[in-house]
Every structure is written in structure tokens, then in C-alpha cells.
Image (cartoon, grey):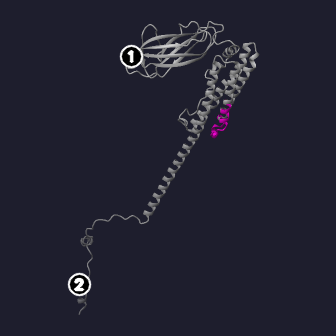
Amino acid sequence: MSERDVDIDFDFFEEEAPTEESSRAERVIRRPGPRGPRRPPRAPQNLTPLLRLVGLVAFAILIIVLLVFWIKSCQASSKSSTYKSYMSKISEVASSSQQIGRQLGDTLLAPGLKRAQLQSKIAALARQEQLDVDRGRAITPPGPLVTEHQAVIQALQFRVSGLTGLADAIGATATTKNSTTAAGALASQMQRLLASDVIWSDSFKAPAEAELRNQGVTGTNDAGGALVPDSQFLQNPALATASAMTTVVERLKGASAGTQNCPCGTELISLKALPSGKELSTSTQTPIVVTTSLQFQVAVKNSGNVQVFSVPVKLTVEQAKGGNIVKTAKIGFLNPGDETTVTFRNFPQFNFSMPATIKVEVSPVAGETKTDNNSADYPVIFSLAG
């Protein structure tokens, strides 16, 4: 074999350099075929316990929040119950004391009582009032109302001292010839009773109402009454004046009420329908629109020259088809020449237009001789509003 033959053999097996076309064909051939649907990515295996932990923490927080609200609600309910229970107990004492005050007014104005009888009755009222003081001291107030509770005790003590002092003064003035001096001694004791009403109103009721508002306590007391009770001992503050006590002194000296220094008596002045203020006539029929706020106001004058006490006033609505409505009131006392008004409320609504007569009667006082001006009939016709 020659050297040339060897060269030919080597040339036959020599590889050619790949062209651009062959490279492209190779890349096409190697491209993978179409794939199947892709599987969703799987969540990391350690995320599920974390989510569970977050849920448990959130649930625990919710339970704690609800528990806090429940505790606060229970505390608020307990606080409200404590205040209302206290006010219910105070209300009982207030009502009892106020009733004693009414009895005092009736006793002072009652004719025919002798000095010893009047003194004994008032002394008995003082002993009853002392029981209210004892009941008040036995009540334990909530902490924020300690000062206000002390005002309650102070007001009740003023009432005891006023009643006791009044009973003693009635006995001590038995030999006092000067009526003005005797009346002044009685009036000074009555002023203690008047002061007790101011203490109750200004030092207990008003600040207690403010404190309960601050505490968020509203509504009524446990008995269904006013949350903070009032207690007005003297229903008529004018009883604490020397003028009123002068009449008491003169009566105790033996002058019968309303008969000494007569002429004496009362006079019916007018009758008005409220809230319109329309004055009724005795000669012509007055139309009256019936509403839930309908009231009648009677004006009475002391036409004599001595004080009058405990004067009854009666108003009767005489309906054409029957079913009369009767209401009564009482004037505590009235000085000579003075006028006062008595208002009658709470009249039912009528279902139809109807005529009626309103009759007003002012009872004559003892010793009154002129009685033709004590009563009158007022013709009216009622109609419904609208």
C-alpha cells in the first residue's frame, strides 16, 4: 500500500463540520413532545399546623373579649341593683316622713282641739318621726352616696326637733298674753320643718340624681317609684309663717275658728278651662274641646277679715246622660283678702259631643253668713279635638 492510499482512507472517515441547517434540525428533533395537564402546586407541608394555631389563637381572643364584656355587664347590673335597692329603702322612709307632715298640717288646722290635745298629738308625731330617723340610720348607702345619706339623716332629725320644739312651745305659750309673741315662738319651730325640706331637696335629692347619672343608673327604684325620692314635710310652706301660727294661738285661747271678728267667709271668683285659659260663663254655654290635658281651675277669695283653714272645694261635671264626674280638693288656709286657685286634673275624653253642666261648690267656713257667692253652675258643651 502506498502513501497516497493511506491519505485517501483518512479523508473518507473525516467528519464534516456541522452546518447551521443541521444544527436547527437537531434542535427541532430534540424538542420534547406535548405534555399532559399540569398538577396544582402542593402547599408546603408545614403551613397547615400554622393555620390551625392562628385559628385557635383567634378563637381564644374572642372568648376572652366575650368574657370581659360579660363580666362588665354583670358588674353594671350589680351596681344598678345596689343603687336601686338603696333608693327603695330610702323611699319608704321618705314616704313615711311625708305622711307625718300631712298629719301635722291636718292637726294644726283642725278646729276644736284644746291646747293639751294639740300638744299631745304633735308630741306623738315627733316620736313617729324618730322611728324614721332610726330606720334611716340602719340603711347602708353605696360608697359614692355616703354624704347624701347623711343629708337624709339630718333632714329627718330637723323634723324630729321641729315637732318636739313645736309641742313644747304650745305648752310654754299657754300663759303668754301677747298673741304675736306666742305665734313667733311656734313659727320658729315650724321653720325647722321648712328647713328639713330644703336639706332633703338640695343636699340629698339633687346631688344623688347627679351621682346616679354619672354611674349610668336610670329608670325607677325597685318599688317602681321615682329613682331618687322626694320628701316634702310641709305640704303648705305658709304654715311656717307667724301669720298662720297667730290663728292657731287665737284658736287655742278659746276663739272658735272663723267666728271671732267676723264677717268672715269665702267667695267663688271664676272657673277656667285649661290649657286654653278660657273663662266659663254662668249664663251662656261655653264650648270646650276635650283633650288629654284638659283641666279646670277654680279661683277662690277670702272675702272676710280673718284667716280661713281647710276649706273644701268640689267640682262636679253633670253629664246629660248620667255618669257624673266628681272631684274634690282642699284649700289649706287663706289670709283675708287673698285669692288662691285650685286645679282639677285627669278628666276622661268623651266619645261624642255632649252638653253638660259644671258645678263648683266652696264649702262655707264656720260663722259665714253670706253663702250665695260660694257656688255656681257653668253650662258647657264638650267636643272632641279635631
Could you tell me which secondary element the residue under label 1 belongs to?
Answer: strand
Query: Magenta: predominant secondary structure element?
Result: helix
First along the sequence among labels 1 and 2: 2
Front-most of 333 and 40?
Answer: 333
Q: Position of residue 236 (x, y in %)?
A: 61, 20
Question: Is residue 41 highlighted in magenta?
Answer: no
Locate the C terminus by quadrant.
top left
Residue 112 is left or right of residue 8, and the answer is right
Q: Position of residue 77 (x, y in %)?
A: 54, 43
The image shows residue 376, relative to residue 224, as above or below, that is above
Front-most of 120 and 82?
Answer: 120
Q: Which residues are magenta?
A: 129-148
Q: Who's the residue at 62% across and 6% down the image?
A: 263
Q: Who's the residue at 23% across and 84% down the image?
A: 12
Question: Is residue 130 highlighted in magenta?
Answer: yes
- In this orientation, does residue 248 appear? yes
Residue 218 is left or right of residue 251, and the answer is left
Residue pointed to by mark 1: 354
Disc 1 residue type (three-letter) = Met
Residue pointed to by mark 2: 12
